[in-house]
Image (cartoon, rainbow, N blue to C red):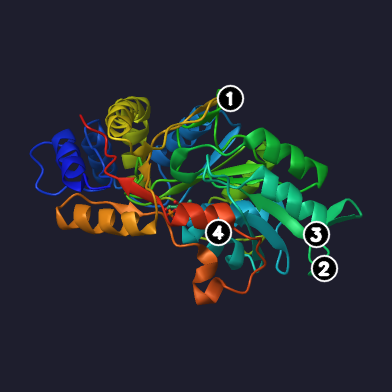
């Protein structure tokens, strides 16, 4: 590719009058000020308040689930969702190595170990083909639960991640996990508003998780949410993330070792104002994605688009470049010219602290690691 400067100019033109073009910046054009000021004036800025309740109702509605719980960030949401799916210390959890570190940390915080399986080239998320291959080779059903023949440990959950908002092959993963009696927890941190066969990502597994970090399409500053169709699990999620305190007007009695993972009301206020604009933001992002896709097609560069049967939220938009050398030049040229781009994550097992966990050949993950870059994807108003 020799047309870096053309691409840099083109991207700059999409975001005019900006000296530096970030990858994804938040947009506060709704009722954010009003709601946050309301918190300040009411003094309800901390762990309880009407915006937390409102946020949970909005999240259950938009994820089409029975219950949503507001928490302090996506990582803690994943940690608790895994615990509630049945993951215990000494267990194993199947997931992908091509992900943000939080997916893996949440497993390890539960005392469990990740098993890294390959992704699909098209979805960039956990591959049902790899999942099936792995379980046929290493899986063993004992007393109705799945064990890993190699390590003798229980495979207590499977956690696919919808990379950059592109849904994984949900049906296939659910079918395989059902066969092996492995609960699915969806890491939908990046895929708020994305759909698979007309249903929101996050709503398919036993539990699903979203992130509201500042780099996401909608943000609460920092925040997360657990969603589930199992109301009892949802109630447990609320209990565990609010220090497992038994409701009482003044006594402090806790019936479990819970967590203080509560989303403060002031953050929930911001999130509520943002969620009110989610559809509009995604509409705007999809327009940008369409423009990018036409442009990059015209110059012979592979811009990643949604697959049939899915709707992507186009959180971070991606190019798939020819090889690592081209990727490295592209990253250098764009960033030097104040157009922020970044590579997809380094495969997690390449970091020494994460290198000892079981994994398959990772052919697709390695291929994508060398080629995928994110380009500026903010909502343009
Ligand atoms: C795939 C994935 N999982 C989990 C998280 C964790 O979310 P948070 O940053 O809110 O803890 C993020 C993003 O930040 C993410 O991209």
| Residue depicted at x 67% and y 42% | 206
CA distance for labels 2 and 4: 22 Å
Q: Crowding at label 2, few (<14), some or many (≥20) Cα neighbours within 10 Å?
A: some
The residue at which mark 2 appears reads as 152
The residue at which mark 4 appears reads as 97
Residue 316 visible? The answer is no
Specify the label residue 138 is tagged with.
Answer: 3
Q: Is residue 136 above or below residue 308?
A: below
Mark nearest the camera among 2 and 4 is: 4
CA distance for labels 2 and 1: 36 Å
CA distance for labels 4 and 3: 18 Å
Per the image, label 4 sits on a secondary structure element best described as loop
Q: Crowding at label 1, few (<14), some or many (≥20) Cα neighbours within 10 Å?
A: few
Cβ atoms under marks 2 and 1 closer than 8 Å = no
Mark nearest the camera among 4 and 1 is: 4
Whether residue 302 sits left or right of residue 128 in the image: it is: left
């Amino acid at each position: 590719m020799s047309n870096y400067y053309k691409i840099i100019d083109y991207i700059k033109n999409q975001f005019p009058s900006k000296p530096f073009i970030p990858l994804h910046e938040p947009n506060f054009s709704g009722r954010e000020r009003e709601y946050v000021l309301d918190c300040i004036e009411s003094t309800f800025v901390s762990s309880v308040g009407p915006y937390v309740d409102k946020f949970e109702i909005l999240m259950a509605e938009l994820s089409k689930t029975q219950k949503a719980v507001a928490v302090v960030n996506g990582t803690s949401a994943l940690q608790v969702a895994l615990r509630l799916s049945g993951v215990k210390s000494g267990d194993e959890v199947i997931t992908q190595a091509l992900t943000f570190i939080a997916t893996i940390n949440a497993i390890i915080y539960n005392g469990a170990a990740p098993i890294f399986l390959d992704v699909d080239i098209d979805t960039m998320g956990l591959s049902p083909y790899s999942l099936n291959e792995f379980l046929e080779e290493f899986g063993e059903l004992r007393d109705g639960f799945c064990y890993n023949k190699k390590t003798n440990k229980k495979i207590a959950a499977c956690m696919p991640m919808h990379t950059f908002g592109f849904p994984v092959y949900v049906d296939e993963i659910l079918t395989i996990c059902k066969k092996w009696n492995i609960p699915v927890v969806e890491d939908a941190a990046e895929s708020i508003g994305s759909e698979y066969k007309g249903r929101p990502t996050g709503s398919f597994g036993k539990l699903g998780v979203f992130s509201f970090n500042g780099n996401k399409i909608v943000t609460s500053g920092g925040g997360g949410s657990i969603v589930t169709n199992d109301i009892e699990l949802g109630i447990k999620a609320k209990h565990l993330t609010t220090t497992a305190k038994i409701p009482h007007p003044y006594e402090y009695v806790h019936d479990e070792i819970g967590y203080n993972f509560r989303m403060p009301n002031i953050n929930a206020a911001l999130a509520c104002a943002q969620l009110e604009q989610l559809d509009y933001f995604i509409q705007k992002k999809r327009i940008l994605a369409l423009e990018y896709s036409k442009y990059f097609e015209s110059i012979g560069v592979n811009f990643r688009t949604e697959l049939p049967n899915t709707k992507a939220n186009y959180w971070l938009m991606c190019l798939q470049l020819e090889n690592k050398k081209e990727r490295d030049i592209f990253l250098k040229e764009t960033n030097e010219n104040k157009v922020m781009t970044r590579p997809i994550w380094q495969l997690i097992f390449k970091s020494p602290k994460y290198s000892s966990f079981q994994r398959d050949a990772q052919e697709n993950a390695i291929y994508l690691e060398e080629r995928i870059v994110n380009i500026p994807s903010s909502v343009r108003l």
